[in-house]
Image: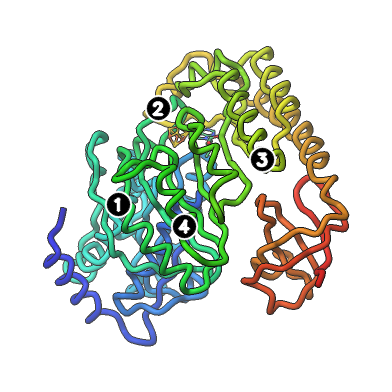
Amino acid sequence: METRTVRQDAAELVRRWVIPGESRVYVLTFGCQQNEADSERLLGLALSLGYGRADSPEDAELILVNTCAIREHAELKALSIIGGFKHVKEKNPRVIIGVCGCMAAEPHRVEDLKRRYPYVSFTLEPAKIACLPTLIAETVQRKKRTFLLPDAPDAVPKIDEGIPVERLSRHKAWVSIMYGCNNFCTYCIVPYVRGRERSRASGEVLSEIEGLVGNGVREITLLGQNVNSYRSDCDFTGLVRRVGEIEGDFRLRFMTSHPKDVSDDLIACFSGVPHLAPHFHLPLQSGSDAILKRMNRHYGVARYRSIVERLRARDPEITLTSDVIVGFPGETDGDFEATLALLREIGFDQVYSFIYSPRRGTPAADYPDQVPPDVSRERMRRLLDLQCEISAEKNRPLVGQTLRVLADGPSPDGTPGVVTGRTAGGKLVHFNAPENVVGQFVNVRIDRADAFALRGTLSE
Ligand code: 5AD
Ligand code: SF4
């Protein structure tokens, strides 16, 4: 780990290199909410070095690509976009391109970027975001490209508190409370690229949230790869209860949880903690015990079902969402049918489904019984069709109800006069309203519902 002085010297050097009013930074983000939170730190650090914000990569002197390695598709997309930045660098030799995020923690990708992408100046793995000034300094001072080898996989990196954060929303905020994952699900690259679990001190988390709520933030999402295994001076439930005691008009969410760490105490929070939104995202991954075992998930269908029953006993209206992988090695027609049957039985409000993607270095990538792509695609199609019906059915009873919605921003398709927001359960709502409601809680009467969104009218 570099010392504080090294870091300050590097920052000074970069500040001298940056041209005020001219040098700008562009951060491109792939992947999960954790990456979005990390990007806010990358941006915060770059701004603290004197860079301004660019609206596009063509307009930037510092381009940071915050990558995702969870599936091959995400990696290929990032590589193709990085490839396109060659021309930006050719036009302006001052341009510095850094590849951050999970791909920057995969030794074979780092090697590849070093050899085949000569216009990339450095890679920076997620656990070392604070080293950004040093990497830029190396580039400008010594004209040196830096491709740090990721830490040993069993290392527990130190948490860097105090990295400046440039939040992209004024009313919603990510608050990372723990990093890394110790679970080693056999399909997943995360434990290799984000290292061992480590949790922030509760005092740091609470004062960050108090500051945010004091500034008018209306929604706080506690983030972690395995958020409910948070453990420092208190456990996760202790932390949720303490956040619940903070005064203010805000919603509290958390993600992503692992079923093996869902305690009765956590379930009890859904009826006892002020602010806690009635939404639980709880990845199932498969509805077959045999597959769950091969995935190394540490729970079976019976245990998952019991969690759902207990959650619904606490709050019958709770929104339940999940992740499912189709085509995991060895998944038979029978295993897949068991997944469909469980989805029907549980009735999730929304399911994020993914075709299994082999990740180099994970155990499942070497399993001999890989499922042929056309079989996986067909299963995926059937799962999507089924879940679409279920989601529509779950949303239908909301028609006619008036719900409290946090107005998030203008409609994504740009329709004038339409604003998009989320209900307490996390459901997407499009409604007619002036743009000045963005950032506020408003009441919306639901007029229509389909599988993916609700449509409503602002009500007084
Ligand atoms: N292939 C497909 N999906 C994956 N996920 C994680 N690893 C893989 C993989 N190798 C899914 C899981 C996880 C979600 C974030 O991504 O469902 O919950
Ligand atoms: Fe990956 Fe499993 Fe850890 Fe989630 S819990 S990040 S799926 S290894």
Foreground label between 1 and 2:
1
Q: Amino acid at mark 4?
A: Glu
Whichever of callouts 3 and 4 sits on the residue coming sooner in the sequence is 4
The mark nearer the N terminus, 4 or 1, is: 1
Q: Earlier in the sequence, mark 2 or mark 3?
A: 3
Observer-nearest of 89 and 123: 123
Q: Is residue 161 above or below residue 387?
A: below
Within 8 Å: ligand 1 and the Cβ of disc 2?
Answer: yes
Q: In what element is the residue under mark 2?
A: loop
- Which mark is first along the chain, 3 or 1? 1
Apparent side of residue 219 relative to residue 82 in the rendered image (left or right): right
What amino acid type is highlighted by mark number 2? Thr
Label 1 CA crowd tier, 10 Å (few <14, some 14–19, many 20+): some
- Residue identified by numbered label 4: 245
Looking at the picture, which amino acid does disc 3 mark? Asp
Residue at disc 4, CB closer than 8 Å to ligand 2: no
| Circle on res. 362 | 2
- Which residue was labeled with disc 3? 315
Instruction: Tell me which label, 1 or 2, sits earlier in the chain.
Output: 1
For marks 3 and 4, give the CA distance. 20 Å
| Of 365 and 261, the residue lying toward us | 261
Q: What's the residue type where badge 1 is placed? A: Ala
| Label 1 CB sits under 8 Å from any ligand 2 atom | no
Depth check, mark 1 against mark 3: the one in front is: 3
Few, some or many residues within 10 Å of mark 2 (<14, 14–19, 20+): some
Q: Residue at x 72, y 61 (%)?
A: 404
Dot 4: what SS? Answer: loop
| Number of marks | 4
Q: CA distance from mark 2 to mark 3?
A: 38 Å
Q: Which residue is mark 1?
A: 201
Q: Is 161 displayed left or right of 377 in the figure?
A: left
